[in-house]
Amino acid sequence: MTTNIAAGTAGGGLSGRDHPDTGAPVILRELGRSFGNVRALDGLSLEITPGEFLALLGPSGCGKTTALRIVAGFETADAGYVAVDGKDVSSIPAAKRDMGMVFQSYSLFPNMTALDNVGFGLRMRKHRSGERNRRAGELLEMVGLTEHARKYPHQLSGGQQQRVALARALAIEPRVLLLDEPLSALDAKVRLQLREQIRLLQQRLGITTIFVTHDQEEALSMADRVGVMRDGQLEQVAEPSELYAHPATPFVAEFVGTMNRIPAGLLAAGQVRAIGDAVQRLDGADGAVPGDVDLLVRPEELRIAAVPGGNGIVTDRTFLGSMTRVSVRLSGDVTVKVDLLSTEAAAMPPGTSVEIRLAGTPVLVAERR
Amino acid sequence: MAAVAGTERADQAAVPPGTARRRRSRPPAWRWIILVIAGAYFLIPLYAALRFAGFKAFPSVLHQSGFTGALALSVRLAVITTVITLVLMVPTTVYVHLRLPRLRRLLEAVTILPIVIPPVVLIVGVLQISPGSLKSSANLLALEYVVLAMPFAYRSIDAGLRALDLRTLVDASNSLGAGWPSTLWRVILPNLRTAMLSATVLTIALVLGEYTMASLDLYQTFPVWIVNFEQTSGPVSVASSLLALFVTWLFLMVIATLGSRRAARTGGSQATLFSVVRRDTGGTR
């Protein structure tokens, strides 16, 4: 896959789009939507700044695609509104919202070549044929598909089709770009390449972008901010590093990254005790009643050492390259995962007695499961 | 189709190349037996008709009284019926697929009715409710034929729509600024071309061969003329039947071939006479 975005080969063809912050601010306010008895969106509120790349992340059925379709104008909200550039667009049909969208399934028009697909939006805007083809050509060059301009969708690979779809969405110079799991149908290698390509393009063009995905790796690696959704509501909106390091809720903690649950005892003064260590709670202790809880801790926040008669036994190892994830069974049939350097993990085959300790960093606490 | 192709590739990979080639070049004997029986079933009556008519009867068909008028009426009715059928059925079926998918089963049941209800009943009903101006016009027959063609046309168009990711295509078109007319004209209809060709082929074939309704309505369409003329000259009547069969078959083949060629170029659906087969639109890998 040739990528020439960084070099900026499209030049000034996309007038006024080569600088950041040309996108529009988007506000979702108290959005509600039901399908029969199912509440798909339940008071979703979100503010996206101009030029921001925001990912909506969540499990299937959490309402993220419904939210995107309401922003696009394909669905109407039962309650609340969407504002773009400060104007309520709820009553504006999808065709007049000037939003580019890339879909999960291949959405290119099968009866048109790649060039005609990219030029379709311009045709709808009454651009002359010559101008249309010139600009469609620029967009195809931008996504590295100039030599495929005359091909029909069935003659292109899945990755190429999605790049044409991206070029088509960008051709209309949208103020908001909507991406509905555009990478999920692609194989891993192409997905990684296209991921970088989309991010580079978005940064270069400065288009406000909403990206819906259930893949946390995609969301964390591409977005400026990630909104984690559950049951039609936002659990947390934060930068990827913040989301990983300081999850606001147990759901976010367990949905983003790998998380261990260890039975613990809640103490007074905002502390929690587990596997012999007492550590500070991450989310404060206001009003907490001492008792049984689960402690949530990431694999890299546990310390492990091979010790005869330790508090755990190694049951499995997963090689991850420079790191290895070691599974350890603690007393009470609790299994935890610990990340450590592969060179160190080599000395801990299954059956090794180990001592597991908390690293001492503040931890998140959840109700006992 | 893609799945079938995939299976074939898998099969070929599992056996040595030489074996696959031998299998392809020598189909099993039972296939030949079925082919010969089916061929005989269709061809023997045609051969018998050809022998009965004799080759000399064919040139005289064109000069028989009423032939040109009957043929022109049938062609006119075929054109009118096809246009009305497509104009009615395409938007209706698209709308049901997009907005009222739950009604698809009901629509399927409704479109079956013309096959279940005898033509005589249909005609009596139509004559009861049609306005006087239509009763004296052959165009009334076209309206009746639209009802008759409905089961075939609906199934062709429905199959074509099922082969498309209609919802995504429509959403994509809308997001790019196309309203409904543009989406229908530039996106849906071109991708439904083969399904519409299939519906056209079936409708034309039905109209050119329909006898009962035309006869009951006292119009001399081509099939009615053939039956009437049989009393004057058997060989000429049979020759005209064969001629009609050949011309209709030729016409249908031309339409089907044109549809298939375009489908091959754009990778779209391929029309057959009774269905629309989806090609692999998932792209190359």
Image: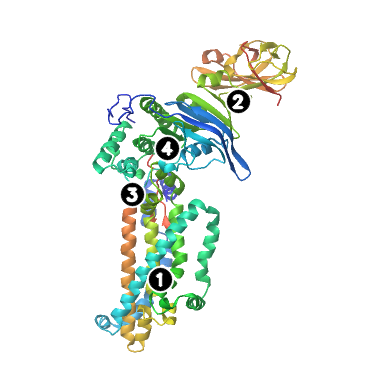
**Where residue B105 sits: x, y (%)?**
55, 58
- Residue type pointed to by label 1: Leu
- Parent chain of label 2: A
Q: Earlier in the sequence, mark 3 or mark 1?
A: 1
Which sits earlier in the primary sequence, circle 4 or circle 2?
A: 4
The residue mark sitting in front, 4 or 2, is: 4
Query: At which x and y percent is residue A32?
Result: 58, 38
**Up-down relation of residue B212 to residue B181 (above or below):** below
Residue B260, position as x, y percentages in the image? 34, 56
Give me the C-alpha separation between circle 1 and circle 2.
64 Å
Q: Pointer 3: residues within 10 angstroms few (<14), some, or many (20+)?
A: many
Label at residue B206: 1
* CA distance separating discs 4 and 1: 44 Å
Residue A215 visible within the image: no
Q: What's the chain of the residue with tag 1?
A: B
Amino acid type for the residue under numbered disc 2 = Glu
Q: Nearer the viewer, residue A35 or A4?
A: A35
Separation of marks 3 and 2 at Cα, in angstroms:
46 Å
Disc 3 on helix, strand or loop?
helix
Identified at 46% across, 66% down, the residue is B150
With A175 as the anchor, is A91 left or right in this view? right
| Nearest-to-viewer mark from 4 and 3 | 4
Residue receiving disc 4? A101
On the same chain, marks 4 and 3? The answer is no
Q: Which mark is residue A363?
A: none
Secondary structure, mark 4, is: strand
- The residue that mark 2 highlights is A254
Placement of the C terminus of chain B among the 4 image quadrants: top left
Q: Chain of mark 3?
A: B
Q: Which residue is mark 3?
A: B266
Q: Position of residue B176 (x, y in %)?
A: 38, 41
Residue drawn at x 36%, y 70% as measured from the top left: B78
